[in-house]
Image (tube, rainbow, N blue to C red):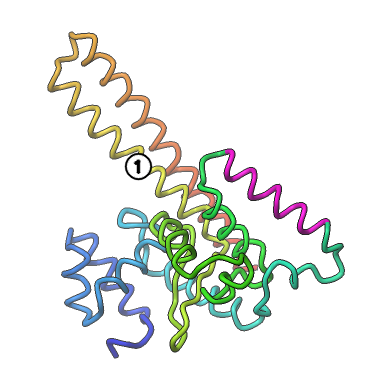
Amino acid sequence: MPGGRLTAEDRRHIAEGLAAGLTYAEIARRLGRSRSTVTREIARNGGPHGYRAARAQHATSWRARRRKRAPRAGVPQAAGNRDAGTVREFEERFVAMMVETGLAPMTARVFAALFLSESGSLTAAELVRQLHVSPATISHATTWLEQRGMVAREREARRMRYSVDVDVWYRAWTASARAMAIWADTTRHGAGVFGTDTPTGDRLQTTSRFLELLGHDMAQAAEHWRQALFMRSKH
């Protein structure tokens, strides 16, 4: 059904559509799904170049099992027998680390709340209560995180639930690798525009070579991790 969950067959069609160079809108039309559903599915499972139907199905099944057995709790309740003060201190350190390395403070706080919760999953209302901010603030932060594959969004009746899972760093890393590829292509084109025998063209060509090599190595590292994670999940 168009409004139901994606099936293994749907995911196979998505993979085939990507391989054929179809747009997200065309893939969605052929499946009878919304474009946003297809976009989220691809973004959370390796992106347009790394999407694999079998792995996406496996990851979805893993997330479903994890949600069933994990309690719905935020950081303060997730401490269990741990000292609440020590947990809070680590949370603040975790947020500070992310801010220091480039995330906006509120985005870092939202990601930390999700990542450090017992279930790795909180509703928008739970985030509002826990962080004492407005729904619009949560929406802004989660949109930024979702665009980079760091959180997933699911609707539960009238509630919006956000979650992170074990694939979060893989998705973020592959997104960075794709960004490197875009930079490499653009600077390579620029080298041709200016001419490689000019200082500007030479600088652009050197940049392109560096980013192409970096992106390639990043993609290989991400795939290595994906295979290691898949093997671990089988045991």
Residue beneath the point at 47% across and 59% down: 141
Residue beneath the point at 66% across and 81% down: 69
Q: Is residue 111 above or below residue 75?
A: above
Along the horizontal axis of the image, is 164 left or right of 209? right
The part of the image, by quadrant, that contains residue 115 is bottom right
> Along the line of sight, which residue is nearer the eye, 137 or 72?
137
Residue beneath the point at 28% across and 39% down: 182
**Which residue is under mark 1?**
179
Is 97 magenta? The answer is yes
In x, y percent, where is residue 108? 56, 52
Is 226 magenta? The answer is no
Instruction: Name the quarter where the N terminus is drawn.
Output: bottom left
Along the horizontal axis of the image, is 105 left or right of 140? right
In x, y percent, where is residue 13? 26, 73
Q: Is residue 58 above or below residue 116?
A: below
Q: The magenta stretch spans which residues?
A: 86-100
Other-residue count near label 1 (Cα within 10 Å), few / some / many at <14 / 14–19 / ≥20: some
Marker count (numbered)? 1
> Along the line of sight, which residue is nearer the eye, 107 or 42?
107
Q: Which three-letter amino acid code belongs to the residue tagged 1?
A: Ala
> Along the line of sight, which residue is nearer the eye, 114 or 215?
114
Along the horizontal axis of the image, is 205 left or right of 195? right
Q: Is residue 4 above or below residue 201?
A: below
